[in-house]
Image (cartoon, rainbow, N blue to C red):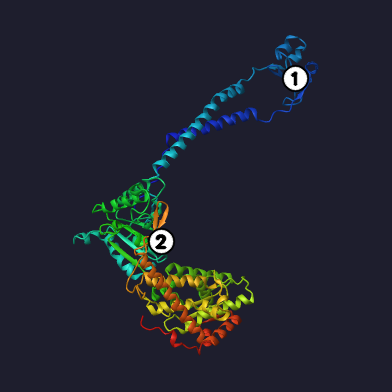
Amino acid sequence: MAKKRAPKPPKMGISNILRLAAFWLIVVAVTTLAMNYLSPAQDLKDVSIGQVIQRANEGKISKIEGQGNDLTITVKGEEKPSEKAFLQGGVSTLLRENQLNEKAKQVVSDKAPSETGNTLWNLMLVILPVLLIGALFIFMMRQAQGQNNQAMGFGKSKAKLYGNDKEKVVFADIAGNDSAKQDLEEVVDFLKHPKKYRSLGAKIPKGVLLVGNPGTGKTMLARAVAGEAEVPFFSISGSEFVEMFVGVGASRVRDLFTKAKKNAPCIIFIDEIDAVGRKRGSGMGGGHDEREQTLNQILVEMDGFETETNVIVLAATNRADVLDPALLRPGRFDRRTNIMLPERKDREAILNVHFKNKPTDDTVNIDKLAAKTAGSSGADLANIANEAAIIAARRNSKKISNADLTEAFEKVAIGPERKAKVMNEKEKELTAYHEAGHAIVGHILPDSDPVHKVTIIPRGGTGGVTWFLPPEDKSYTNVYEFKDILARALGGRIAEKLIYGSDGITTGAGSDLRKATEIARDMVIEQGMGKKLRDQVFHEDNGGMVFDKITHERPYSDDTARLIDEEVAALMQEASKRAEVVLKANMENLHKLAKALLEEETLEETAVEDVLVDSKLPKEAMLHAA
C-alpha cells in the first residue's frame, strides 16, 4: 500500500511576507520602547549635594555614580542606589572643587551618558511613520484588489455544485411519482451508459422540463436523477441569473455552462425557470431587457451543445404556460415530465416515509389519513406529519396519536382553531344557522361530496367551517357536481335569509359568494359549460406589464363578455333557488342542526347524518339534462 504524501506547506506571497515582516518589526520596536521607557522607575530619594559631600567625607556612602548632571548615591550597607542628587557638571565638578577628602574620592565614579534610548527613539520616529504608511498602502491595495475581484466575479455563476455529498438522494428515497421516475430513468441510464445509445445513433436529450404544482417534489426528483447517475449536479434558481445590470444574467449563463462542460457528464438544474423563461416581447425595453438577454443566452447555450458533452439541463416550473415557445421546442427541452398530485396509494407511501422516524401509537391509521387528504401535495403531507409531532410534543406525549394526526390535518387543511375569539350569543346563533345551511344543502344534493365536519368554532379567517371531503380521488368534475357545489356554497346565505329575513343577511357569506362566482365563471370561460356558450372556451391571459400598466388580453368581444356575465348570473341564480328549495323543505332539520351546533360546537360526519336522517330532496332541486 502506497504511503500518503505529506501535504505541502502553503506558499506565501510577497504581500504576506511583507505584512509578516512589518508585524514583527513593530513588535520588536514596541517591546524595546516599553523596556526603556515603560519599565517601573526606581524610587530614589532627592538629597542636597551638600549632604552628599558631608556624608561621603564621613564614610557613610559606599558609591557615588554620575551620569551627566545626575548623581546616584548608594548608602553604606546597601546594595542598590537609594538616593539621588543634582550637580551642574556632575562628577567632574564634584572632584574639581576638592570638597571631598581622599577617601571619599575613592567612591566616586563616572560613566558616559547612555545614548541607546535616544537612538532608539530617534530611530522609531523615522521607522514608525514609514511602517504606518506602508500598512495603510497595503490595506488600500487589498481593498482595491477585493473590489476588483468582486467586479470580475459579478458575472460568475452562483450555481451550487453537488455530487460529492455523503448522503445522496435516489429514487428509492422518494415515495410516489412513479410515472415521473420512469420518464427520468432513461436520462439516468444515458448518463451512466452513453455508448449504448450512441451505438444506435441516439442523441442525448438536451433538456427535461419538470412541470407540476408547488410541493409535488420537482426539485427532489432532480436531485434523485443526479444521485442515481452519480454525476455532478449544478443547482441554481432562475432568479439568480437576473441582476439590475444588463448583460450580467447572460454572463452568468455562459459561466454556468462553461463549468458544466468541464465537469461533464453532469446535470444543470434550473429551478423556477419561469423567472427568466417567460415569453419575450411582453415587457419594456424590447431586446435590451435583461431578462430577455438572459433567456436568449440560455437558448443559445442549450442549442449549441457539442455532441460529446453529456450535459443535461433539468428545469422545474409550475407555470409552463408562460414559457417562451423557443425554450420548449425539440433540441432544447426535448422532454416534458408532468408531476401530478399524488393519488391515494402514493399519499400513503409518502406519509409512511415521513412517519418512518416518528414514534406513533396503535391508534394511528395512515391509510385513513391518505384517504382524507385528496388533493394534497407531498409538501402538504410532510407539513401534516410535522404538525402532528409538534402537537404531541406540546402535550408532553412520547408518541403521536390519531387525535394528534387529525388535529394536524385539520389545522393544515382549514386553519387552526381560534378558541380565544369570543362571539356573543347572537353571533353564535347566526353562525350555527349559516353552517347548518351549508351542511343540509350539501348533504341532500345527490352529486355533492359528503359532509366531513361542521363547526362554529372560528378557524383561520372564518367564523365557522362546513367541511366536505370526496369519498375517493377524482380526475374529472361534471356539470351536476359543479352545480351542487354552487348550491351548497350559497346554502349559508340562504339560511340567513330564511331565518332573519332579506334584511338580516350578513357579511359572513362574503367568501362563499366570491368562491362560487369564481367557480361559475370558470365553468363558462374555461370549461365550456354555459347554456348559450356551450362548448366554447374563452381563456383569459393572466396579463402583463406594458409601460407600467397591467394589461389583460381578452380573446372575445364585448357582446361575448355580456353573454358570459349573463351565463354566470344565471348559474348563481339557479344555485340560489335550489339551495332555497332544499332548505325550505327541511326547515325542521335546519333548526335541529343549528341547535346541535350551539350545544356541541363541532359535529363529525356521523353526528350530522344522525340529525339529518329524515331529510328529503324536493323535486324542484333535481337537475335535468343541461
Query: With respect to residue 552, does 451 lie above or below?
Result: below
* Three-letter amino acid code of the residue under disc 2: Glu
Give SS at disc 1: strand
Res. 362 in view: no
**Who is closer to the viewer here, 578 or 615?**
578
Give SS at disc 2: loop
Res. 192 in view: yes
Residue 430 on image: x %, y %:
58, 77
**Who is closer to the viewer here, 40 or 288?**
288
Dots 2 and 1: beta carbons under 8 Å? no
- Residue that appears at 33% across and 54% down: 280
Residue 285 appears left or right of 609: left
Residue 246 on image: x %, y %:
37, 45
Give the image quarter of residue 561: bottom left
Question: Alpha-carbon neighbours of circle 1 within 10 Å: few (<14), some, or many (≥20)?
Answer: many
**Who is closer to the viewer here, 303 or 189?**
303
Which residue reaches farthest left? 200
Q: How many numbered dots are placed on residues in this image?
A: 2
Question: Alpha-carbon neighbours of circle 2 within 10 Å: few (<14), some, or many (≥20)?
Answer: few
Which residue reaches farthest front? 559
Residue indicated by mark 2:
167
Residue indicated by mark 1:
85
